[in-house]
Amino acid sequence: MVSMTSSPPGDTSTTAGDETTTGSTSEGSESSGDTTGPPPPSFECPPTDNQCSLQEQDCPQGFKCILWDAEGDLVEPDATICAPVDESPAELYANCTNDIATCTDDCPGGAACLPFYDDGGTCLDLCDANDECPGDQVCQTCGSCAAAWCVPTCDPLAPDCPETLGDCVLDGSFGQVAFSCQWELGPAGLGDPCFDVSDCAQGLMCTEQEDLGPGCLDPACCTELCDLDDPAAVCSDPAHVCVPLFIPGQALPSQEHIGKCALPEAHPCAEPSFCPPPGIDDGAYAWCSVNNENFCTGIGIFGLSSALDCIQQCFCVDNCAVDADCPAPATGTAAPICLDQGPGTENDRCVLPCGGGEVCPDGMVCSAAWGDICMWESALPSDECI
């Protein structure tokens, strides 16, 4: 069994034969510089139990929490261990080595040598307890994986992914849809049939036939990605224009400029329930649609739709305990209250009553169907109207 230790700073102990001495000011006098102190941390290798949390990274200074497995299987490992940080580590996204015998790897602090992109391992940052990553990275995982790791985001119009990770691919994990570097794209070319986002070559996007028109003869085809900020952007098919790839508010700021070549009606805001009307969201009560919960991320949505009236009404759920927990809208006269939803406070919700003639915030309507409270209203998609 190997014991991993680190010496405390300033330790001046030396060993001669069977005697151990420490530096002192004079013989026989008490040293003011005695640095013996408590023993340094020690961790067993191989481990007999989990020593730390990957997400919390709660090892002592100079150590990091990584996965360990006696057979080298880091998808379903035996334990988590506190490993000493390599003094000359490999760079992030570089190939790396796991040393099973010493319970270490050669990646920098906060990173681990993981086998998801190369059998030998690649240095990848680990996601924190909130599934967030340092820098311009997004969190990834797999159903049976013991770790969640970070990969860099990228621009598919000017890809610069590390060779160890693959191409710039559109993917969604942990609720975030973004282009990131993580696997190899397929060989399908412009106009070729496709079935998945990874089927088309770099610079192309797999898109449904209804968004592309008669130029696509299959259920989905590869179309060009384009730059929404480039006024000179031209699509190969004259019937196509550069339309946004993401619904407004969904994209990372660095990827809001990415579009795809498609029919004009493929614009995500062509359906009134998918994009917020301009200038109505004051930030206190986020705009929403029952067809687009993106604008209520993390707090849920309640609403109704009527195909007879061809309208939708909804509001984002803000939980509360007392009225003071509820934000005050920037416009209108409706004052928020915390509406009791029964025993306990975990389901109580902020609402804006309007039954006494109060004016709802700009863009909201007073909904009698929900007991005279303010709600957002938008039209149903045309194919849902009777």
Image (spheres, rainbow, N blue to C red):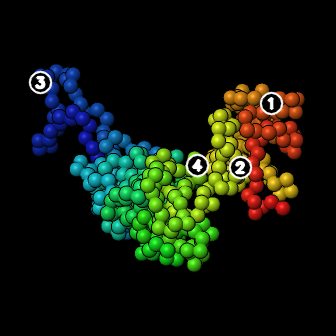
Q: Is residue 110 left or right of residue 236?
A: left
Numbered circle sitting on residue 12: none
Three-letter amino acid code at the position of disc 4: Pro
Q: Residue at x 59, y 74 (%)?
A: 214
Numbered circle sitting on residue 248: 4
| For marks 3 and 4 on the same chain, the one whose residue lies earlier in the sequence | 3
Label 2 belongs to which residue?
289
Q: Residues within 10 Å of mark 4 (few under 14, many from 20)?
A: some
Vertical placement of residue 60 versus 256, above or below? above
Q: Is residue 51 left or right of residue 246?
A: left
Residue 206 pos. (x, y %): 52, 68
The nearer-to-camera label among 2 and 4 is 4
Numbered circle sitting on residue 359: 1
Residue 117 pos. (x, y %): 38, 65
Label 3 belongs to which residue?
27
Three-letter amino acid code at the position of disc 1: Val
